[in-house]
Amino acid sequence: MLDTLQDVLPEQDIAQDMRVPVVLIRGDGIGPEVADATCRVLEEVHKGFDWLEAEAGAAVMEKGIKSGLPPETLDKIDKVGLVLKGPLATPIGHGGKSSNVTLRKLYELYGNVRPIQPLPGLAGPFADRDINFTVIRENVEDLYAGVEHMQTPDVAQCLKLITRKGSEKIGRLAFALAEAEHRSSVHVVTKANIMKLTEGLFKSSVEDVARDHLNIDLDHMLVDNCAQQMVLRPEQFEVIVTTNMNGDILSDLGAGLIGGLGLAPSANFGDNVAMFEAVHGSAPDIAGRDLANPTALIRSGIMLLRHIGQTGAAARLSDALMQVYREGTHLTPDVARAGTGVSTMAFCDAVLAALTDIPERPVPAGTPLSLKRPHTARRNPLSTTRNFDGADVFVEWQGDAPKLALALETVLAGTGFDLTMISNRGTMVWPQAQGRPDTVNHWRCRLMAKAGSGADEADLPDLLQKLSQAVRWMHVEKLETVNGAPGYSLAQGQS
Ligand code: NAP
């Protein structure tokens, strides 16, 4: 099942008896239970692990370290570069940022590889389907950059950051993996019909990368369609490369196809650090009850073994896992037939027992292929022309659009700028409003430089000062035409 990844991921080739230091973060909720089970089976197939325990997550946040990541943990990761991690809980709607996302960003773990491959013997609507694809999720950009601001006391904003550099890096990883796995197609999945600049840049960057891999078909699919296609015809997918948020959701959907989050592994790759973790979170509802399924983290451990070149040990553990699932008598409650579920540790014992039937095998000769460093191959093309067009000024205003326009036009008289459009939540409300859009107290006011006025960006501070006399502005976006195309979106209803 996961064997194909051996061709892609190894960057180190370590002799079977060599000590391998791995930073072990047990994590929150069910983390310690699934981590213990995983370490037990990994130690059985490879004797050389040195687990360097490190703290992270909720308990650390409670001690007052907002990131959930103490300096000692970061030091260990810096030194060792290899991490096995249980899930880390993140408070919802308040408190510190996600320690998971912070870890991925601190070490530029840009490539999140999530194989979706079923295990034998499981019942379910997709049990007889030929599902075998990998979601490659860009892991550090998009909304997960977590750049958020309250625009008014009632309006919150999150910046969706997509870069050509980040998109090319993940595109290269996707094609490298597709080639190493002898796949024939890659789907780039976006919402570029709606977010033409951000998701559009991701799409065009991956398409640029595809020109260097003409042996592999690249298809584009919109993310909403992809979600239903994954349910209706999952067999069509081999490799899906997508933005952070899309990838987060699609890979959980993929986990659902193969029997649930308890089964789905993942690896996070950067230039210097590789971190292996389950797709699932801390599942607080079943934490501490010896009920959690450790399969996802064990499969992540199998990916780790391949990463360090222990392909024989990886294949052995994978075979043992298959055997336990094929027999179906020692499965945790999430995947067991009703009334037959066993505890986390009993499942782990069953895997260990299965291993006794599977002989040790040497690292297969001739493997692994090495993954060409995908991030260094291409230089970003530089923009050739940029022209200043004006600015979108976002203001807080309690009245209606015509009154706001009047107030702004009064201030703008005598400046080099014209008010050309006001939108509210993205929909044009002035000079014309179509339909019946509801409004909030946060308005985008598009101020364009008057033709022939000579107004340019140097005039913006003065302009803002004048605007402050009439309105409370919150932020400003410069408007530029880049290489002949507007580098900003139209409002809905604007033509
Ligand atoms: P979750 O922890 O993944 O759990 C969702 C549900 O999936 C659980 O309630 C449980 O369902 C089932 N499940 C997940 N893992 C399982 C396993 N190993 N064995 C059996 N069942 C399993 O998602 P969540 O409840 O949305 O998130 C909880 C916390 O985890 C949040 O703080 C979130 O931020 C964090 N999180 C962390 C990571 C990470 O560390 N990479 C990833 C995702 C979420 P049943 O109700 O059927 O028991």
Image: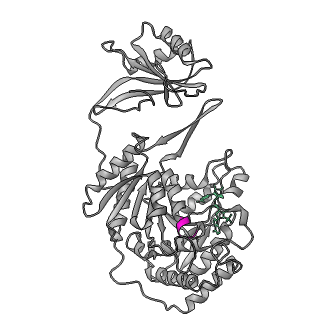
Which quadrant would residue 486 be assigned to in this image? top left
Is residue 404 in view from this perspective? yes
Look at the image and give the residue range highlighted in magenta: 255-259
Quick check: 53 left or right of 287?
Answer: left
Which residue: 44% across, 70% down? 132
Q: Nearer the viewer, residue 136 or 130?
A: 130
361, above or below 396, in the image:
below
The image position of residue 477, as x and y in percent, is 45, 28
In which quadrant of the rendered image does the N terminus lie?
bottom left
Which quadrant would residue 450 be assigned to in this image? top left
The image position of residue 7, as x and y in percent, is 37, 73
In which quadrant of the rendered image does the C terminus lie?
top left
Q: Is residue 333 magenta?
A: no
17, above or below 375, in the image:
below
Q: Which quadrant of the figure shows ligand 1? A: bottom right
The majority secondary structure of the magenta stretch comes to: helix
